[in-house]
Amino acid sequence: MEKCHNKKYILTKVDDNYENFLKGLGFNYVIRRFAMSLSPTTQLLKLNNEEYKLITTTSFLTHSVTFKDGEEFEYQTVEGRKVKSVFTIKGNKIIEEQNEGNKKVTLIKEFKDTELLTEMSVNQITTKLKSILIE
């Protein structure tokens, strides 16, 4: 995982199920269209022996979440949802499990040498995204 620290990846491809995933999160049509037009960057920082920071940046905002491996905490997602979440690091993957009442959301980020592959699921709707290394 260390080889991925401080590198930036930009979203370049989403699959055909991305809009359905956003719908599953409860996004209305306008918000879905807006989200689908963005190409965010993602960066992972290791702050110290225990804490990591995941930063998502778009042309409109920057959102970051600081977490410890395996520790549950509450936070507000980039789109404003309040969730309980656990981030788990397994090899070159970060697995985030969000709990928002009756919604269970799973995000798996797999860091590779030149790309970041993300799989996201909500209520059995799954989508895949690909980001490429830019820095």
Image: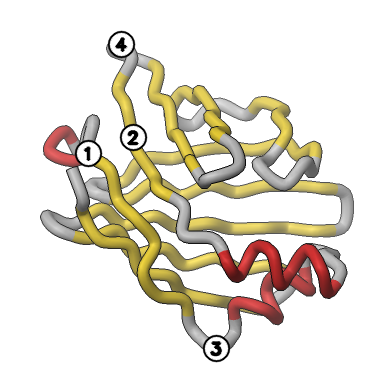
Asked if labels 1 and 3 touch by Cβ distance under 8 angstroms, the answer is no
Q: Amino acid at mark 1?
A: Lys
Q: Amino acid at mark 3?
A: Asp
> In this view of the protein, which residue sits in the foreground, 43 or 67?
43
Q: Which one is closest to the eye, mark 2 or mark 1?
A: 1
On the image, numbered disc 1 is attached to which residue? 7
Q: Amino acid at mark 4?
A: Asn
Calculate the distance from the C-alpha at mark 4 to the C-alpha at mark 2: 12 Å
Q: Amino acid at mark 2?
A: Leu
Q: Determine the residue positioned at 65% across, 63% down.
A: 35
Measured as percent of width and height from the top left, residue 47 is found at: 33, 14
On the image, numbered disc 3 is attached to which residue? 16
Residue extending farthest top: 48
Left or right, 4 with reference to 60: left
> Badge 1, how many Cα within 10 Å: few under 14, some, many 20+?
some
Q: Determine the residue positioned at 60% across, 49% down.
A: 97
Calculate the distance from the C-alpha at mark 3 to the C-alpha at mark 2: 26 Å
Calculate the distance from the C-alpha at mark 4 to the C-alpha at mark 1: 17 Å
Q: Which secondary structure, mark 3?
A: loop
Q: Which secondary structure, mark 2?
A: strand
Asked if labels 1 and 4 touch by Cβ distance under 8 angstroms, the answer is no
Q: Which one is closest to the eye, mark 4 or mark 3?
A: 3
Asked if labels 1 and 2 touch by Cβ distance under 8 angstroms, the answer is yes
Q: Determine the residue positioned at 54% across, 29% down.
A: 65
The picture quadrant where one finds residue 24 is bottom right
Is 59 located above or below residue 29 in the figure? Answer: above
